[in-house]
Image: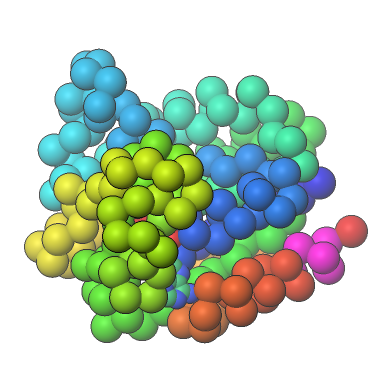
Amino acid sequence: MSNIILLGPPGAGKGTQARKLVEGRGMVQLSTGDMLREAKTSGTEMGKRVAEVMDRGELVTDEIVIGLIEEKLVAGGGSGFIFDGFPRTLPQADALGRLLARMGQKLDAVIEMRVDDAALVRRITGRFTCGQCGEVYHDETKPTQVEGTCDVCGSHDLKRRADDNEDSLKTRLMEYYKKTSPLIGYYYHAGDLFTIDGLAEIDAVAAAIAGILDQQH
Ligand code: AP5
Ligand code: MG
């Protein structure tokens, strides 16, 4: 069993790779972005509070996301958890360490996916996802086989995210460099950090991640 963090800026490919690990290894994906988008559409008080913050590309409070993760950890992790988009700040990283320790578990690897900013902009502005099964596509690098139809589940519910525009993306990148990139040093010092080339093709990135996972016991 391995618990891993996929760490990288918006568009690095965290969600794409997490889905492959769920399918291939039976791991459980914990994406705070997906949880918050779900809360946004649920009409709850919390959903309303986070919607504007997310659409602007800012981070929501540590308290909210730590609470979401805590709930999911208790539900169990199959053959391991993939933390996708969490932690994003030093207090979140500390909280994750405490939560795992309380469950008698630990972090096995933090995989930093490195991608340059120009490629991130191309990836984010071309992304769309299936509203039914969550499959992630791209206008150029991963179009659907039949236009307007999801390859995986056949749905026509293909969507673009409200924060996938140039203004919000600029803010998301700033937030990443200011608040999240310090985690690279944090996990390097803890001895958990592995860095991979996120610019490689999707299958090559998946192979690099598999290589790291296979080194863990
Ligand atoms: P979140 O949903 O986590 O967004 P993000 O971090 O900005 O990352 P993305 O989902 O945009 O990118 P990704 O790395 O998953 O890339 P993907 O695989 O889709 O967070 C959204 C918001 O929620 C935040 O801004 C914040 O407001 C809030 N939030 C979430 N977590 C929080 C937290 N912990 N604390 C506070 N606030 C939080 O790929 C992108 C595109 O590239 C796709 O089209 C894909 O097909 C393509 N692609 C992927 N890999 C490759 C490849 N190797 N080659 C070519 N194309 C590729
Ligand atoms: Mg994602």
Q: How many numbered marks have been drawn onto this rendered protein structure?
A: 0
Q: Main secondary structure of the magenta part?
A: helix
Q: Which residue is drawn at 28% across and 54% down?
A: 148
Instruction: Establish if 75 lies above or below 78.
Output: above
- Left or right, residue 57 beside residue 199: left
| Residue that extends furthest to the right in the rendered view of this protein | 217
Instruction: Establish if 55 lies above or below 194.
Output: above
| Residue that extends furthest to the top in the rendered view of this protein | 44
User: How far across and down, in percent of the image, does residue 100 sit?
Assistant: 68, 37
Q: Give the range drawn in magenta.
A: 212-216
* The quadrant where residue 12 appears: bottom left
- Left or right, residue 5 beside residue 59: right
The answer to whether residue 88 of the structure is visible from this angle is no
Q: Which residue is drawn at 19% across and 27% down?
A: 49
Q: Which residue is drawn at 47% across and 43% down?
A: 153
Q: Which residue is drawn at 76% across and 63% down?
A: 213
- Left or right, residue 76 beside residue 133: right
| Residue that extends furthest to the left in the rendered view of this protein | 167
155 or 111: nearer the viewer: 155
183 or 43: nearer the viewer: 43
User: How far across and down, in percent of the image, does residue 93 sit?
Assistant: 52, 48
Instruction: Establish if 160 lies above or below 202.
Output: above
213 is within the stretch colored magenta: yes
User: How far across and down, in percent of the image, does residue 9 sit?
Assistant: 38, 66
* The quadrant where residue 190 appears: bottom right
156 is within the stretch colored magenta: no
- Left or right, residue 55 beside residue 10: left
The answer to whether residue 75 of the structure is visible from this angle is yes
Q: Quadrant of the C terminus?
A: bottom right
214 or 190: nearer the viewer: 214
* The quadrant where residue 192 appears: bottom right
